[in-house]
Image (spheres, rainbow, N blue to C red):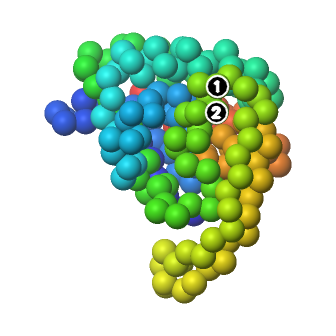
């Protein structure tokens, strides 16, 4: 997948790239959004209060650290939060539009926010079988039903990752999975 996501300062006034990502949604970006943000704008581009994004991230951090004990979440979060605190803008933009699908094979962003806010490690979700059109050629695709039985698996799926793949990454790559590639 060649999708791309970005986190920018002041999205409406000379935005400065703060962090970027390819192929996945960084875990911390999920915690910056509210369900209201997602319901208000389903195309994957969000303009949110910088201070609220920081507070939401700080609030979800203990749960994410516990859930993903094998990832360097605390260090990655600290570097991203420090960068966000130094910005002087009121809002930040999170653009993950390339990663949004109208009929995703994975859980959606609202599912991720519900799982994070529930603080339940065993958040489960059933996605029924369905038929969708291939996004490129329009062919009919039959998607099998999917049972997700843990919050960790569900969040990884939303981010376009799998727990097995995490073992293939080096430390720096794992930090980018958490916060994206942080720009200086």
Q: Residues within 10 Å of mark 1 (few under 14, many from 20)?
A: few
Quadrant in which the N terminus appears: bottom right
Nearest the viewer among 165 and 138 is 138
Q: Nearer the viewer, residue 95 or 148?
A: 148
Residue 176 visible in the current orientation: no
Say if residue 103 shows up in the picture: yes
- Nearest the camera: 105 or 174? 105
Q: Say which residue appears at 63% left-offset and 55% top-offset.
A: 106
Q: Is residue 142 above or below residue 68?
A: below
Which residue is pictured at 37% across the width and 35% down the height? 37
Could you say which quadrant of the image residue 33 lies in? top left
Label 2, on which residue?
A: 115
Looking at the image, residue 115 sits to the left or right of residue 69; the answer is left
Residue lying at 62% horizontally and 62% vertically, measured from the top left: 105
38 to 137, vertically: above or below:
above
Element marked by disc 1:
helix
Q: Position of residue 6 (x, y in %)?
A: 41, 42
């Amino acid at each position: 997948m060649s999708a791309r996501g970005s986190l920018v300062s002041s999205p409406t006034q000379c935005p400065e790239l703060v962090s970027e990502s390819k192929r996945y949604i960084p875990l911390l970006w999920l915690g910056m959004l509210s369900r209201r943000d997602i319901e208000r704008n389903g195309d994957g581009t969000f303009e949110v209060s910088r201070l609220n994004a920081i507070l939401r991230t700080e609030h979800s951090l203990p749960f994410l650290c516990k859930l993903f004990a094998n990832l360097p979440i605390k260090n990655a979060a600290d570097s991203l939060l420090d960068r966000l605190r130094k910005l002087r803008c009121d809002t930040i933009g999170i653009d993950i539009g390339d990663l949004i699908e109208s009929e995703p094979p994975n859980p959606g962003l609202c599912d991720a926010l519900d799982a994070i806010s529930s603080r339940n490690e065993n958040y489960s979700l059933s996605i029924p079988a369905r038929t969708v059109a291939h996004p490129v050629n329009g062919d009919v695709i039959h998607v099998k039903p999917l049972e997700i039985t843990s919050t960790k698996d569900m969040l990884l799926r939303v981010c376009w990752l799998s727990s097995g793949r995490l073992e293939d990454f080096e430390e720096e790559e794992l930090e980018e999975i958490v916060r994206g590639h942080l720009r200086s």
